[in-house]
Image (cartoon, grey):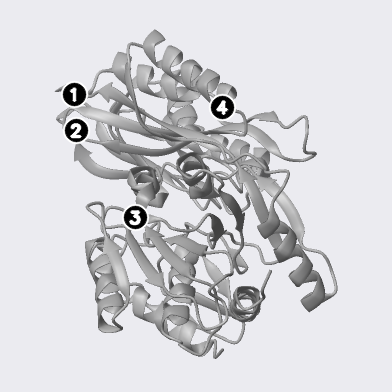
Amino acid sequence: MNTETVFKYFEELCGIPHGSYNIDKISDHLAEFAKARNLKYVQDELKNIVIYLDATPGYENEPMTVLQGHMDMVAVSVDDRDMKNVPVKLMRDEEYLFADGTSLGGDDGIAVAYMMAIADDKSLAHPALDLLITVNEEVGMDGAIGLDPKLIRGRRFINLDSEDEGIFTTGCAGGVRVVAKVKRELSEAKGIEAMISIQGGLGGHSGQMINKGRMNACVSLARVIYELAKHTDIRIVSFEGGTAANAIPGESRAVLAVAAGDEDRVQKRINELNDVIIHEYHGKDEGISLKLEYSGKDVAAAMSAADSKKLVSFMIAEPDGVQAMSGVVEGLVETSLNMGLIRTGDTEITLQYELRSMIGSCAERLKDKVVLIAEAFGIDTEVSSSYPEWEYREASPLRDKMVKLYREMYGTDPVVEVIHAGLECGVLAKKLEGFDAVSIGPDMQDIHTVNEKLSVKSVERVWEYLIKLLGTKD
């Protein structure tokens, strides 16, 4: 039951770049892991992995169980390093695992490390296990959506994709991802090139942190450009921001053409807006700064002033943040919207929106609102992915067993809750009749950001609990 085996496998995974859509190498690595140990496994066309473990002696009649997590991570860095080829440099002190200048990938690499450690230790007692490791969870749950349910033998699921020890998640929001495409037509421009940026926002997971009132840097920058355009000729060349649709953008930047002679006036207004934004987010998102830099170059081509205003007006008009709170669970966000990503291409600027709701019809209504607002601006949209909510199950033998064991081990009850974030359990529940699941995990901080940390002691305690749970008979 040595936890260092878990840390060894986690470090091994960190050495393989595995951001979403860049999962071939890590999937193949997991397949080789199973093959080297003569374990039965399946690697499907999507690169999902299922490893099958037989019940240990005396556990043949215990309910077959599935351990589940995902192999991809939100791969971001403090600079422009190529996260498709550069591995995570794992750092460790007495309290935390963290990375050098990048996100860590504890979400959900620690789940994979737990499963590898279990598969590698024949001394552990457990029922028959399916170790399900899916792909591209962070960008729409593609792996879970495309999974053939016939590959899964068990119906008791222990999902290992939670970030708070002692909290048992038993339901979650569903979601829809909408992509808006704004035409980018450049025309001759006369102006000074300026880079305007908002930096220092906390960002964070758009499900877990959406109720914290943190700044959306992309929306805030759109507002700044809109304000500047009221007083001078401002034309957009490019607009970039965010790291993923399901992460609140903490930084954003745009290249503008500023009318010659207006440089000082624009700088003065930037200084004023910087103070306004800092004041608005005081106590909620400290460290924000708005900056303007002139390159000294002339701009040859940019979007028209009308199209520039159309883009930022659309971004401001779309809803942002919490849209409704639950009327059933106190303090739970029911419905929310996050504009998480904006990118500039040759002919269009794309924006990705992540919509979440605990109620399917509310998610559909919010999606319609996003699309209708886009249509009013003459902007095309498409739904790139959607996933269902995971409804709380009144009768859950697995939950009852897990709560009882937790109480015995720690002398207190765990928190049993439903969360606003999305989990693959919602997708899998729709595929597998009799699905009974609980999601757990060790303490993590600031997932999906370069400040991500994973608690060493919590990893150890969750490992101890998980092994005790698998070895406890019904």
Q: CA distance from mark 2 to mark 3?
A: 42 Å
Name the quadrant containing residue 62. Answer: bottom right
Q: Secondary structure at mark 4?
A: helix
In primary-sequence order, the first of circles 4 and 2 is: 2
- Residue 420 in percent (x, y) is at 62, 42
- Residue 119 in percent (x, y) is at 42, 79
Asked if one can make out residue 243 in the rendered structure from this viewpoint, the answer is no
Q: Secondary structure at mark 1?
A: loop
In primary-sequence order, the first of circles 1 and 4 is: 1
Name the quadrant containing residue 103. Answer: bottom left
Q: Give the residue type that dot 4 points to.
A: Gly
Q: Which mark is residue 189?
A: 1
Q: Which mark is residue 135?
A: 3
Which residue is the site of mark 2?
Answer: 299
Q: CA distance from mark 4 to mark 2?
A: 47 Å
Q: What is the residue that sits farthest to the top in this orientation?
A: 376
Looking at the picture, tell me which residue is in the foreground, 313 or 107: 107
Query: Callout 3 environment at 10 Å: few (<14), some (14 to 19), or many (20+)?
Result: many
In primary-sequence order, the first of circles 1 and 3 is: 3
Disc 4 to disc 2: CB gap under 8 Å? no
- Residue 24 in percent (x, y) is at 22, 62
Q: Secondary structure at mark 3?
A: loop
| x 41%, y 50%: residue | 138
Q: Give the residue type that dot 3 points to.
A: Val
Q: CA distance from mark 3 to mark 4?
A: 24 Å
370 above or below 274?
Answer: above
Q: Give the residue type that dot 2 points to.
A: Val
389 above or below 30?
Answer: above
